[in-house]
Amino acid sequence: MILDGVKILVIEDEAKTAQAIRRGLEAEGYDAAVVRTGEEGFSRLNSEAFDMVVLDWMLPGRDGIEILKTLRARSAKPPVLLLTARDAVEDRVTGLDNGADDYLVKPFAFAELLARIRALLRRTVPGEPLRKEVGDLVLDIRSRLVWRAGQEIVLTPREFDLLVHLMRYEGQVVTRQMLAQDVWREPNRATPLDNVIDVHLAHLRKKVDEGRRTRLIQTVRGVGFMLKEESEP
Ligand code: CA
């Protein structure tokens, strides 16, 4: 796998942990930058494009959650893996609700960190066109920005991934099972994800189609969904 140019920003105040992560990432071929405070992290994110952020929750000054909130408000953000010593369920929920894409509890094995990073990076498929257009809907993979009729649409990371998938299969039916496997990455889950998928789809549809002259996200009854420009009545 070519990792050339995959840039990861590590925001971690503990020197030993930060150095260990950087050395490990570089050994894997990633281009890793380390900063020690939320302020520094924020200014790097404002001035450079990163493919991914490894973010410590407990930081001096602006903490990880504050950084997440600010990043989230901007909509164009790289995936964020949140590191924390806090392991309560409510802490996980706080992290994910504030826009973290995944969550890793300290202390962790480096192999686990790498596995999570790979999984988050896999959400963008190598060789895929970085810009997709269907009708007046435009999606940019790299910046994770979406526009309809020139107007930006703010999506959550999950909604964005769903839309990428629908656009990849434009004009074809996408089943809930495909979405469970390719967007949620849980093909063999005991409890079906159908309700979860439907809720996210409903949110996505509202943002993309509500109040528009043509609808793009179509429901194919009993089968799944399809992204297709509706023919005008
Ligand atoms: Ca810390």
Image (cartoon, helix red, strand yellow):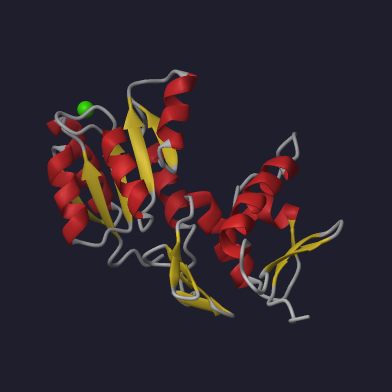
Where is residue 221? Give x, y as percent.
85, 59
Q: Is residue 43 visible?
A: yes
Q: Quadrant of ligand 1?
A: top left
The quarter of the rendered structure image containing the N terminus is bottom left
Q: Residue furthest top?
A: 88
Relative depth, front residue between 72 and 161? 72
Q: Residue at x 15, y 51 (%)?
A: 43
Quarter holding the C terminus?
bottom right
Q: Is residue 30 visible?
A: no
Tell me how many marks there are.
Answer: 0
- Residue at 18%, 46% in the rendered image: 41
Residue 150, placed above or below residue 119:
below
- Against 175, residue 58 (above or below) is above
Residue at horizontal 44%, vertical 44%? Answer: 101
Q: Residue 20: image x %, image y %?
A: 21, 38
Q: Camera-side residue: 202 or 87? A: 202
* Residue 68 picture location, percent across and down: 32, 41
Place of residue 197 in the rendered image (x, y in percent of width and height, measured from the top left): 68, 47
Q: Is residue 215 left or right of residue 222?
A: left
Residue placed most toward the observer, 153 or 5: 153
Most extreme residue toward the right is 222
Which image quarter: residue 204? bottom right
Rendered position, 23 above or below 175: above
Residue drawn 15% across the image and 28% down it: 60
Q: Is residue 170 left or right of residue 102?
A: right
Left or right of 18 on screen, residue 110: right
